[in-house]
Amino acid sequence: IEWANSLSKPIVQRVDPTFNRTVLVCTKFDNRVKELRNEEEANKFLQGEGIPLGAKPFFISLPVRRNLDPHRFMDEAKRCYMDDYRSLMNSHFNEKEFLPQIGFFRL
């Protein structure tokens, strides 16, 4: 998550300082998950740099192709999730802690 450098961070912190109403979503996760080579890197990234204590970001990848019919979109979104999950399993991430935050279908 690029939250530590986000332009929206000060605005969100003013409006919702406790993050009770804010949902943090890291999009294009497929671009980043491939770079996570071990458990330490994966878990550190999934915790989120600069994320307030208790806030749990979501990590999603969506199909690159546009103009998909709804059924095909859902199939492609599932494929993206499975690709991300396989990459995370290869890094030996903390599945118990972070799996509930992975994937479009968890939002």
Image (cartoon, rainbow, N blue to C red):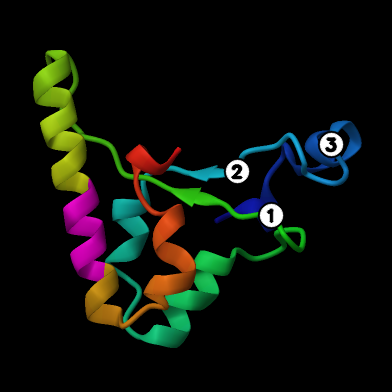
Query: How many C-alpha atoms fall within 10 Å of the one at disc 3: few (<14), some, or many (≥20)?
Result: few
Give the image location of residue 12, x and y in percent. Answer: 79, 36
Write the residue at 56% across / 52% down.
57
**Magenta span includes 11:** no
Precedes in sequence: disc 2 or disc 3: 3
Q: Looking at numbered disc 1 in the image, what kind of residue is underneath it?
A: Ala
Write the residue at 33% across / 63% down.
33
Q: Nearer the viewer, residue 67 or 71?
A: 71
Q: Looking at numbered disc 3 in the image, what kind of residue is underneath it?
A: Asp
Query: Does the magenta stretch mainly form a helix, a strand or a loop?
Result: helix
Precedes in sequence: disc 1 or disc 2: 2
User: Label 1, label 2: how many angstroms apart (C-alpha)?
Assistant: 8 Å
Q: Are marks 1 and 2 in contact (CB under 8 Å)?
A: yes
The boundaries of the magenta stretch are 81-87
Q: Is residue 72 above or below residue 4?
A: above
The residue tagged 1 is 55
**Magenta span includes 83:** yes
The residue tagged 3 is 16
The residue tagged 2 is 24
Q: Nearer the viewer, residue 67 or 69?
A: 69
Give the image location of residue 29, x and y in percent. Answer: 36, 52
User: Label 2, label 3: how many angstroms apart (C-alpha)?
Assistant: 12 Å
